[in-house]
Image (cartoon, rainbow, N blue to C red):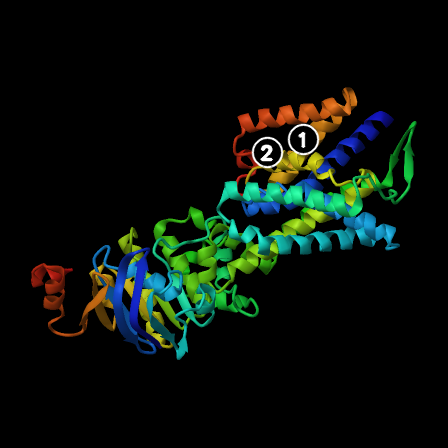
Amino acid sequence: MDLAAVLTLDVLSGIATLVLLSLGLAVIFGMMRIINLAHGEFVMLGAYATVLSANAGINIWIAMLVIAPLTVGAIGIVIERCLIRFLYGRLVDTMLATWGLSLFITGAVTTAFGNTIQGVPTPLGGFEIGDYRSSYYTLFLVVLSATLLGLVFIFLRRTRFGLVSRATMQNPGMTAALGVNPNRVYMQTFGIGAALTGLAGGVLAPVSGVGPEMGAAFVAKAFITVVGGGSAILAGTASSSSVFGFINQTGSYFTTPVFGEVIVFLSAIVLIRLLPQGISARFFKGSL
Amino acid sequence: MLEVSGLHVAYGRIPILTGIDFQLAEGEFLGILGHNGMGKTTLMRALTGSLPLLAGKVILAGADISKAAVYRRARLGLGLVPQGRDIFPDLTVMANLRMGLAAAAREDAAVVDEVLEEFPRLHRLLDRKGGALSGGEQQLLALARCLCSRPRLILLDEPTEGIQPSIIEEIIETLLRIKARGGLSMILVEQNLEFITALSDRILTIQKGRITGELDPKSADFASAIAAYAGMDSHAAEQA
């Protein structure tokens, strides 16, 4: 019974991690159709923003939940203005440009902070389930990911900006003919996607080593989650995170963490072969 | 309301509009009649700003908008109901209508309610996705969405294309009611003679990128003038 509870918590934690990692990419890739190969580096920048702020004496919660998303959101807006906006609709060019950007960010962070792994202590304590131990921070990540899904849903579905943003991604020319500046909407939407990714980096910093190369570990998982989820950015992200998070954690438990990841990538290949349009196209058609 | 002078537009090196001049008065409904490929839609795109001008001026209510971006022209009161309708397919009918209010300082639900009174057919479709509507329903929605933006001038591009006759009648009746209330001007590009005649105060004919004539739908010799333009006998033109 205790083992089942711990395993359930691990699975929920794995799902939450994937939701956090993928939500920003779901906005940037799923909604805006930009293949951002620097996504992992956005996560890394969020983690560094947290580590540097915490080391400078700023409260860890403010560092994770405020400074990390604001910093990466602002960096995202600068990148969109200086690079991405010239490449809308040019898929291959965008991939090359963001790949170059990821190398640049990794190099710049290595030069500035060195190629060493840094970290921040995990806030909150632990608790016991029978003979096993778990941490309250794991529970926090689960609650945060569910809350973020809810907030992004409300933002896209209920707010005026969410409506304008969804319309602009569908038909920027018609949106302009209705008096909206589509360039501004693209910039703001990219910034929101980057901020969500920075938030993911911020809250994952206490549970993962923070170094210049850490983004590489996240980018593939985020992409398979978003592609596996399909066109419905929230229903898709939530469902594919659940599938891959469950497979990863149970696979890791019954074998090894490395083999658990191998099983995830294999199952992603099978999923995309069976559902080429993603889970949401089959089960959540028309959802957000 | 609108002054267009010396308008030249090209696609690459191919000239499409070669010196368009016309004026539109406040509250006037102006028809533009032309065969396929004569530059009607290019003229609309030039007026909305989605195509740059090689030369010429567009003055809207005293403001030179010749170089203004599409969204700035819309904010100055230029509304568009485009050919093909350009409904947002994944948004509901209500969300499409709310997009008409996107440029307003605040979203006023009363505006949508007021516009919906003119379009009873849309009432029962409010929760349906725009892409799931028929062509005629989409045309009504495109017109209603444009009206939600409170335009001073509407550019209506081939609204009857592929639309069933009953909805064409409905669009004519709705536009006549709106016209009777005053305060709104319209440029109407069409090939459907019945539609353009029913709504226009005057009709300009366009051929090979130039305005070639002006017709008065209320004049006694309108049928023969149309016949001369279209190359058919005047009896057939009267029936059309």
Between A265 and B14, the one lying in front of the other is B14
Q: Is residue B154 left or right of residue A219?
A: left
The residue depicted at 41 percent of the width and 49 percent of the height is B133
- Residue A127 picture location, percent across and down: 91, 37
Numbered circles on residues, count: 2
Whether residue B74 can be seen here:
yes
| B217 up-or-down from A260: above or below | below
Which badge, 1 or 2, comes first in the chain's sequence? 2
Please identify the residue farthest to the front as the structure is shown: A111
Query: Between A117 and B97, which is closer to the camera in this rendering?
Result: A117
Q: Residues within 10 Å of mark 2 (few under 14, many from 20)?
A: many
Circle 2: residue type? Gly
Label 1 sits on a secondary structure element that is helix
- Confirm whether residue A148 shows in the render: no
Task: Specify the quadrant that holds the N terminus of chain A.
Answer: top right
Are circles 1 and 2 on residues that touch, CB within 8 Å? yes
Residues at discs 1 and 2 both on one chain: yes
Name the image quarter holding the C terminus of chain A.
Answer: top right
Q: What residue does disc 1 label?
A: A244
Q: Where in the figure is residue B71, as x and y percent of width and height? A: 47, 65
**Vertical side of A59 occupied by A222: above or below:** above
Disc 1 marks which amino acid? Phe
Circle 2 residue? A228
The answer to which image quadrant residue B51 occupies is bottom left
Q: In what element is the residue under mark 2?
A: helix
Q: Is residue A155 left or right of residue B220?
A: right
Chain of the residue where label 2 is placed in the rendered structure: A
Decide: few, some or many residues near mark 1? Use Cα within 10 Å; few <14, some 14-19, many ≥20: many
In this orientation, which residue lies closer to the viewer: A156 or A222? A222
